[in-house]
Image (spheres, rainbow, N blue to C red):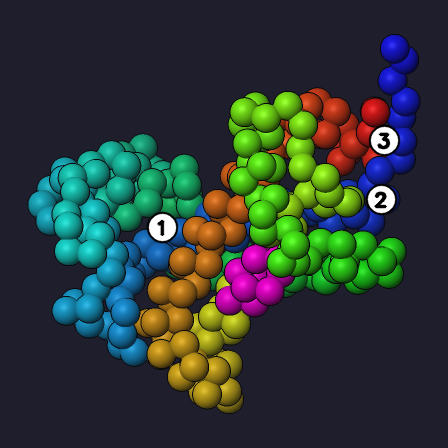
Amino acid sequence: MKMKAVYRYALLTRASHWVWVVAFAVLVGSGLQIFNASPNLDASDKSDPARRVLAIGSPSYGVGTTTLFGHTFVTTGWLGWTEDGMGSSGPHAFPAWATIPGYQALADGRRWHLFFAWVAVLCALAWLISTAIKGNLREMILRPSDLSKLWPMQAYYLKLRKEPPPHGIYNPLQKAAYTGVMFIIAPLIVLTGLALSPGIDAIANPLTAVFGGRQFARLWHFAGMLLLLAFFLVHTFQVATQGFANQMRSMITGWYET
């Protein structure tokens, strides 16, 4: 049977999507560069080893360790003692291939991070406004009636069910993901990022105080990044299980074959 092509994604939607993907990748890499300068996270208003949640370091030459909630693991080569981006290895929390720039440079990492943070926010706003104008935004919000359909939809993605549960433009899992990102994860990342800024802290200290201080804000910021990364991986998995080539073609050209 001949496939029918439908125009699925407008140019603004596609452009904002791919620019955001690039911005997010740079934000993660530059964020890890910044983290390397102080490779620990404390559940406290100030640096406090007694309330340390995560610590990545090198207790001795050639050895890397990661301590999570008081449990220490040897992670040499992966975390703690890694490639330094200059042809050798050293005491760096994350390896050079995962950071932007690859070599240790806190000031450069901050510049990359700040610039692409604005790029990501502007892309998100462009997508949000475009979606709202088209009337699709309300279709992306998870509702109580969708809760019972979450597992059946996941079973469909895992090939444990032949047909997905009835749904509208967006399925229940997509609604749950978009709702979580739009109303929880994204605001958390933006607000904690602002709270971490010395300039914002100076003029809007109550914002920093809301998150328990700059160290606590740093912990929430890192956690938000991990949640957003998890969303990205789940999103990629869903695309892969629903016809990867067709889905990618539609997000590049706008045309989707049905």
Residue 4 appears left or right of 31:
right
Residue drawn 85% across and 44% down? 11
Relative height, residue 88 to residue 230 (above, below)? above
Residue drawn 60% across and 30% down? 156
**Which amino acid type is marked by label 3?**
Trp
**SS under mark 1:** loop
Q: Give the labeled residue for mark 1.
A: 104
Q: Main secondary structure of the magenta part?
A: helix
Q: How far apart are marks 3 and 1 (CA)?
A: 43 Å
**Which amino acid type is marked by label 2?**
Leu
Q: How far apart are marks 1 and 2 (CA)?
A: 38 Å
Q: How far apart are marks 2 and 3 (CA)?
A: 11 Å
N-terminal label among 3 and 1: 1
Q: Give the labeled residue for mark 3.
A: 255
Q: Residue furthest left?
A: 60
Q: Give the labeled residue for mark 2.
A: 11
Whole-percent x, y for residue 211 in the image: 41, 76
Residue drawn 43% across and 63% down? 221
**Which amino acid type is marked by label 1?**
Gln
Residue 44 appears left or right of 118:
left
**SS under mark 2:** helix
N-terminal label among 1 and 2: 2
Residue drawn 37% across and 75% down? 214
Q: Is residue 87 visible?
A: yes
Q: In which quarter of the image is residue 51?
A: bottom left
Whole-percent x, y for residue 145 in the image: 65, 54
The boundaries of the magenta stretch are 179-188
Q: Nearer the viewer, mark 1 or mark 2?
A: 2
Residue 258 appears left or right of 16:
right
Q: Is residue 253 visible?
A: no
